[in-house]
Image (tube, grey):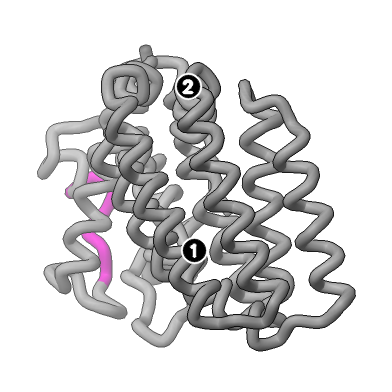
Amino acid sequence: MLPAPERLTDKLAALLTQLIETGELGPDERLPTEQSLAKQYGVSRTVVREAVSRLKSIGLLVSRQGAGVFVAPRHQARPLAFDSSVLGSLAGVLQVVEVRRGLEADVAALAAQRMTSDKAREIGAALAAFEACPPFGAEGVEVDLEFHRSIARASDNPHYERLLGFLEQYQRDAMTVTRTVEARDSEYMKQVRDEHRAIATAVMRGNPQAARDAASRHMVNAAGRVESSTPIVNGTLSAPERTAATNRET
């Protein structure tokens, strides 16, 4: 288990984030002093310092020499980051799958529109690696994700590949569990392989609508497979040793 101060840091960081995102702490507004925050929320100044440092690191707060800490201006670019609690529940993982569903569908359609022989060879190789890899464990997850990356690269839009790469960190553990469950059922594994093959075929043939439909269907079915593995997935997500992994940033 995490030591108490770390849990308090998480809670205070989440609370301050909420105040910023709802506008209760507006852009360019000065944050109360470290001492004031500690008194207001009943925590130590160390907890306040760590929470503020965390929000600075993701661009929500900025320091101004001699003036204090302020909420970042609206125009200031911020790195994309999800609250680590997204990995603490099955619902959070499924929400990420929902986000991916729309992205994967658009990516597949664009890749089909922009298909070339070189791209087709890369996607075909990624599909072959996926089909040849044993379904159990992390290796199977990596070849699965690499297949989707090959489709993203074929879209000729590097932002799609980066965004999907960011989302990967929130799915790896759930995917490892579901692939293990799927591997115990040959019909499940056939369904998964057929879905990947349908995406690859439509994209390589340059059929945007078929590619969009196949990618969307795959993500809907992926969500269903996660839900069907609920007890095992929940057990994995709630394990104490997951905490460090959930705090990874991109």
Residue at x 63% of width, y 48% of height: 145
Is residue 201 shown above or below 16?
A: below
Is residue 118 shown above or below 90?
A: below
Helix, strand or loop status at disc 1: helix
Helix, strand or loop status at disc 2: loop
Horizontal arrangement in the rendering, residue 126 relative to residue 223 (left or right): right
Which residue is outermost to the top? 1
- The percent position of residue 229, horizontal first and vertical second, equals 33, 26
Q: Which mark is residue 35?
A: none
The one nearer the camera, 91 or 186, is 186
- The percent position of residue 64, horizontal first and vertical second, equals 45, 71
- Look at mark 2 in the image and give the residue it sits on: 185
Q: Which mark is residue 215?
A: 1
Work out whether residue 64 can be spotted: no
* C-alpha separation, residue under disc 2 versus residue under disc 1: 22 Å
Q: Amino acid at mark 2?
A: Asp
Magenta-drawn segment? 30-36
